[in-house]
Image (tube, helix red, strand yellow):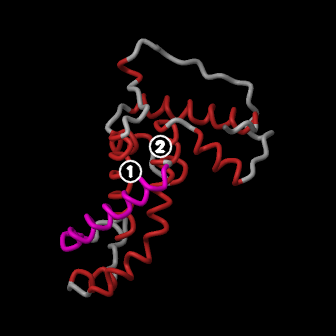
Amino acid sequence: MELTAPIQQDELVERCRQGDRRSYGELYQKYAKAMYNTSLRIVNHTADAEDVLQESFCDAFAAIGSFGYKSTFGAWLKRIVINKSINALRKRKADIIDIEKTNLGHLTEETGYDEEEIRFKVEEIRKAVKELPNGYRTVLSLHLFEGYDQEEIAEIMQISHATVRTQYMRAKQKLLLLLKQGGLS
């Protein structure tokens, strides 16, 4: 018994596969804003996000013939965007440290923040997330906004699961601290 329904073919994707130039533009318009926002949450730089977006669509359009409907086109494209965004961070030498390769040992979880007591506004959160170091922001964005679990993030970023777990924990603590202080630089 199959647990998932097969992915239905997308008429727009099929027209692109047949070489319909107008369909490429329509497909771009359909996904560009969401994919740009996905990239921007990871790279935290508008020009880099724009570059990632263009490169991702170029790669997706070049490989559209091999798209096999194992997922939706949007999910396939998002994976390309996320991988390219992470590569862009690597080029900028992101602040991701493999915890297993350091002498930090086990971190104790700091308490003192009552998450339910703090009331957030969307703009404050957005600003605070932008202030996080690259590694923290990337892990937090992939988990909270893109819905990846920690194992998937470790695989995508090519870092250990322990590093992802630690980066996520620290990102939450730093984000809560920034929001509690209200002092964004």
Q: Position of residue 133 (x, y in %)?
A: 52, 35
Residue designated by label 2 = 138
| Mark 1 crowd level (few <14, some 14–19, many ≥20, 10 Å Cα) | many
> 93 or 5: which is nearer to us?
93
> 105 or 90: which is nearer to us?
90
Q: Position of residue 77 (x, y in %)?
A: 35, 64
Residue 1 visible within the image: no
What's the residue at 41%, 53% (across, down)? 48
Earlier sequence position, callout 1 versus callout 2: 1
Q: Is residue 110 above or below residue 182?
A: above
Three-letter code for the amino acid on which mark 2 is drawn:
Thr
What's the residue at 32%, 58% (across, down)? 80
Q: CA distance from mark 1 to mark 2?
A: 9 Å
Q: Position of residue 112 (x, y in %)?
A: 74, 25
Quarter of the image with the N terminus in it: bottom left
Residue designated by label 1 = 85
Query: Are circles 1 and 2 on residues that touch, CB within 8 Å?
Result: yes
Residue 130 visible within the image: yes
User: For the stretch drawn in magenta, what is the main secondary structure?
Assistant: helix
Residue span colored magenta: 45-68
As for residue 13 lying within the magenta part, the answer is: no
Q: Would you say 113 lies left or right of 145 here?
A: right
As for residue 62 lying within the magenta part, the answer is: yes
Three-letter code for the amino acid on which mark 1 is drawn:
Ser
Q: Position of residue 8 (x, y in %)?
A: 34, 78
